[in-house]
Image (tube, coloured by chain):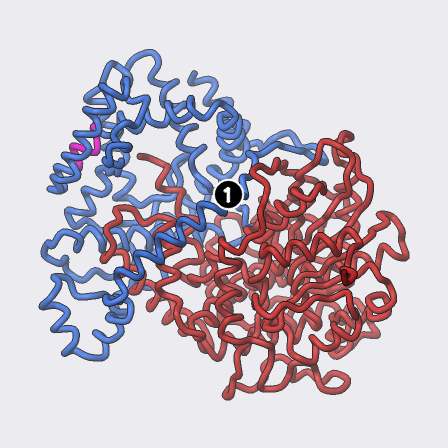
Chain colours: A red, B blue
Amino acid sequence: MTMSARLKLMPLAVALIATGALATESNEPSPPPVSGPAPVFDSTPAAGPVPGSGALVGLADSAGLRATVFGTPPQDMASLPAKVPLSEINIELPWRLPVPGILWFDSKLRVWLSAQDRPAPLAIVISGTGSDGNTKTMSVLRAALYGAGYHVLTMPSPTFPGFIVSASRTGVAGDLMQDGNDLYAAMQEIIAHLPRKVRITDIDVLGYSLGGANAAIVKSIDATEQKLKIHRVVMINPPVSLFSSVGRLDRLFAATIGPGDRAVELLYRRLYAQIANLYRASDRLELDENFLYGAAAATLKTDADFSAAIAMTFRLQLVDMFFIGDLYGKTGVITDPAHPPKVGDSLEDIQRDLRAKPFADYFTRVFAPYYLTRRPDATSASLIAANRLEIITDALHDDGDYYAQTSGNDLIINRRELSWLQDTLGSRIVVYDHGGHLGEIGDRRQVADMLDMLSGHWPRSAP
Amino acid sequence: MRAAVLVSVALALGGCASHIASIRRVPDQTPAADNAAAAANAAAFAEAAAAESGNDSAHAAEEGQKNPEAQKNQEAQEAPPLLTPADAPPMYTYDPWERLNRFTYRFNARFDEAIFLPAADTYRRAPRPLRAGVHNFFGNLAEIDSIINYTLQWRLKYGLRSLGRLAINTTIGIGGLFDVAAKLKLPGTPTGFATTLAKWGMHPGPYLVIPLLGPSTLRDGVGYLADYGVGYGINVANLYRGNISWGLLVVNGIDQRANIDFRYYSGGSPFEYETIRFLYVRRRLIEDEGLRTKEPVKKAADENPAGK
């Protein structure tokens, strides 16, 4: 029994640190009513009150938190095909920046294709914050779309380390327009390199979480450039203001885990003891994936547990983006621009420091300095404003090919942002009464609605 | 054979030929079956949770921490006291050979990407019954080592089970090609000398990345070596020293790899080395806790840092 057991520890992955991460890769959520800590991020003055800057933010409720962590229950899943073929495409993009030695493994962009063997429309799906194109959520969407007759191309988020290194023109991720341009260029390269037997009749783009906002931006770019002629877009649980969504997450982290790495260590110790006790009480001989799923369910019980798991999961995704941004932007927050870490150097202290840093630090110390030097007219406030879906309000409102699906208890938006989505999209948005953030993906109704939106049968005419 | 291995290693180090775009078929996804399995798993856990609802160890742990009275009662009922957060090892991991380990890790990642994984993907295209036969065959051979180690661990019940499995699968299962014993409610639960050392109270020791095998610790590494030594020493049917021993080793490796759902750097994270090290050592420590307490033995002295 040599290596088999050795490598099998990936599932244990986030489990010890944030047990909930096992169930879904949840992205940018926001807190339940928080009384104590002052707003961390939204203190930057923007024009007028920043959406979601109040104490009571987001639409989170207990069911929403639970759904965010555990996802759609298997019994509520739409019927999915028995078999979905899958190919992995690794592509080198001509505009890639020089790759630092320690990131050698991220030098090519990796995307996944499930192709039909007859001419068909292509559905491109963009992943959520920090995630690659082959997550569990993605597998469900891929299966649903493939089953409905689409070629399916799934792509990482522009905030995923592998995307930043292989496809970003800046290395500093998180700017909607810049990320949208990088994505759009990458899509063209990929489509140009698809095997000839993949015959495409039409192109639609979808995305979940941050990927939803990315998808809409990509279509708006395409509307002027006309290189892909993207037809329809479906945004699933999109954020409205990127920075107020993640700002909420910082507050959620502060409220449920506490400030600094000491708090992370306490959370880890608690989880370690709980999992060890569960394991000792069980009759299992091996600490395997099934056990951990059970442990997650047994360990995460209260809203505070769910919130901590969600906040921790997001924080861990942020750590990579923060590190890479600082490295590329030479902003010197965590790496010395004159002596960047080399292959073989320990990164543990860097990881530990970054775990304790909120997203606000990424914005103020990496993102803003980088973009302010390069955009002379910009201010902090204008950078924040440029990262709202409002920058394409007219397109969203006037072009009947933008659609959205979200939940009335999604964590990453507040009531005002939800209303804005409803006012802007009119009948082209559906709001479910459950699901939290991404917790309705794969649900029968979600899949049926998504397919109707993509095929132009939405809103369904009354019988 | 050895030359082929050397060439492979050279290729792995050099990386594969770089094209602008490469497309590679990976195993099909089976969403309908996956969802059915998830539903069954969820149902099983719900059942187990309902059965155990009176005995919530996680909460009991916290109570035990706050309330010594409760802890005493707990101790009276069950042998081992529950772990409290203070018992958890620190987040730092003992890794004195880090620089070497990191290079080995990178070598493993490249080797995996260039050779191991493509080989495993090719192997996965073979008919399922054939692969099952290969897997069962090697699993059956490993039962010999399990019998020895369960005995050394003084867990005779499991040792007998392994012995029963070996007897049934070697005869009725035609030389181990079919896992008949599993169908007779004798599931395979392999063990090895690494676990024996743990049972004897040895700490994991320094973290160690083994070439080709991956994350380990000094103790576990010694354990694997001993397991291989046992196979080599007993040399059943001359499988370990004969002409085909290299071939068998390669097939065994590919079979093992094909059954592991892991991809180096699939998360793209610059901190993967740290994360894997953290998780591997914590997992082993939790398994050690289980070994110490599942069958009542005297509790080992409190250990200090993770792995030391």
Quarter containing the C terminus of chain B: bottom left
Q: Is residue A350 above or below residue A163?
A: below
For image coordinates 63% across by 58% down, the residue present is: A445
* Residue A154: % across, % down: 66, 47
For image coordinates 69% across by 40% down, the residue present is: A91
Q: Give SS at disc 1.
A: loop
Q: Is residue A208 above or below residue A199?
A: below
Label 1 crowd bin: few (<14), some (14–19), many (20+), radius 10 Å? some
Q: Quadrant of residue A412 in the image? A: bottom right
Q: Chain ID for label 1?
A: B
Q: Is A273 a magenta residue?
A: no
Quarter containing the N terminus of chain B: top left
Majority secondary structure in the magenta region: helix
* Residue A172: % across, % down: 68, 61
Q: Residue furthest front?
A: A463
Q: Is B147 a magenta residue?
A: yes
Give the residues drawn in magenta, as a range: B144-149
* Residue B82: % across, % down: 21, 66
Give the camera-side residue of A419 and B92: A419
* Residue B36: % across, % down: 47, 46
Give the camera-side residue of A197 and A186: A197
For image coordinates 80% across by 39% down, the residue present is: A200
Q: Is residue A284 above or below residue A349?
A: above
Give the residue type that dot 1 points to. Tyr
Residue A335 appearing in the image:
no
- For residue B259, side relative to residue A416 (left or right): left
Residue denoted by label 1: B264
Residue A10 appearing in the image:
yes
